[in-house]
Amino acid sequence: MPAISLIDTIAAISTPLGEGGIGVIRVSGPDAVEIVDKVFVPAGKGAGYLKTVPSHTVHYGHIITDQGDYIDEVLVTVMRAPRTYTREDTVEISCHGGITPVRAVLERVLEAGARLAEPGEFTKRAFLNGRIDLAQAEAVIDIIRSKTRASQEIALRNLHGELSQRVTEIRESLLQALMYLEASIDFPEDEIPPLEEDLGVILKTIKQRLEELIDTARTGRVYREGLATVIAGKPNVGKSSLLNALVQEERAIVTNIPGTTRDLLEVEVNLNGLPLRIIDTAGIRLTHDEVEKIGVARSKQALERADIILFLVDVAEGTNEEDFHIAEVLPPEKTILVGNKIDEGKNVDLSALFRRFGAPVFISAQEKTGLDKLKEAIISKAALLEISSAEVVFVTNVRHLDALRRAKEAVEAATHSHQEGLAADFITIDLHAAVDALGEITGDSASDDLVNRIFASFCIGK
């Protein structure tokens, strides 16, 4: 994204294109009210009406062409700076939903002097104008993409600045230590006021606080991206039937022919607030079919990346060498043993697999029985804390996690230098690195290139 000018007035469609009750065009910038005034005729009012209205008021009328013909019937909301999303004058035009009316209204606003917004430019202006920091801006996208109520709540807390506050507090502690050390270097003969605690104690505390945030990243990632749950087993044990049963719709093709599934099929499902990415895999076996070979290879790759593995065996037909070959490559700590087709009878001894994976969960994917116990086992294997109203901050962003890890490494290096009795100059180098890393999270030390890349991932209109 190129550098933006806050002098421009921008406009974009802020609702998804398609049929709907309403569509919203957002206009923001110093000339927002004046531009919309050119194209809006309020019911029973004259030209230039919007310039005189109070902030945060809604007005009924029509968007018109240059010739005075009606384009659409609309409601116009006027919001004056600084109490707006961007801290700029903002006007939102609510017209009829649908591709044609929404685009027609947007084109008319652009003709009147607005510029089409870049992706994420409204939120970027909110950041540049100091209404939110960089971590809060990224939380906006997390809210939009949230898959469950819990993931939305986490993102909402980050939007409210809870993560930023934690990071800022740690950064302030580092800055205080850094200022003390730099003062002692610059004015060695002066009496510098001592730190409240020993530098070693301060660095140890900072490291612990960084580790606490880093430790939340796995749970945060799961709620943001979903728990990769792979269904594995030999062909024709009911993997596709189980996927269909879990998502409660026919998403995978089910036949009695082994090897029907040739590729990965991924479906998202909400399991009691826990987002799962259920992945149906090709049956793992030796095959001479070139297409099936590719599917088997992809299945093995999915197993390596899985958070949880549902290892299906056919309890009616029994186990064979294929089952035990698969079992050897499955990590027990990630795997739940699932005995399927219990409705057809139980003619198999699972004691050998029991010793490796623990007690099996017996189900019938076809009859949809035993699924509640399987869901309980998945939640137990996930071992995730429920998101409650308590003050819990989660790191959900890979960029944030990387910055926290770099800050921790820098603090560890500074601690080592301090313990070795090295000069303050060596310690300050590492502390500067830690401060800069944390500043990348909030935007205090983020480069223009980083900021541009972040906002380029936003949708247009946000």
Image: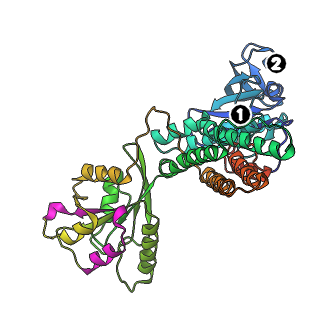
Q: Please say whether residue 331 is one of the residues in the magenta stretch.
A: yes
**In the image: residue 337, left or right of residue 63:** left
User: Amino acid under label 1?
Assistant: Arg
Q: Distance between the residues labelled 1 and 2?
A: 17 Å
Q: Indicate the quadrant where residue 67 lies.
A: top right
Q: Residue at x 30, y 51 (%)?
A: 375
Tag 2: residue type? Answer: Lys
Q: Is residue 453 left or right of residue 384?
A: right
Q: Earlier in the sequence, mark 1 or mark 2?
A: 1
Q: Which of 44 and 462 lies nearest the eye of the viewer?
A: 462
Residue assigned mark 1: 26
Which residue is found at the position 13% from the left and 69% from the top? 347
Q: Quadrant of residue 346?
A: bottom left
Crowding at dot 1, Cα within 10 Å, few <14 / some 14-19 / many 20+, comes out as: many
What residue is drawn where x is 73% and y is 27%? 91
Give the magenta-colored segment's residue range: 321-345
In the image, residue 444 above or below residue 318: above
Residue 118, given in percent of the width and then of the height, sits at 75, 45
Q: What is the x, y in percent for residue 275?
A: 43, 49
* Mark number, residue 51: 2
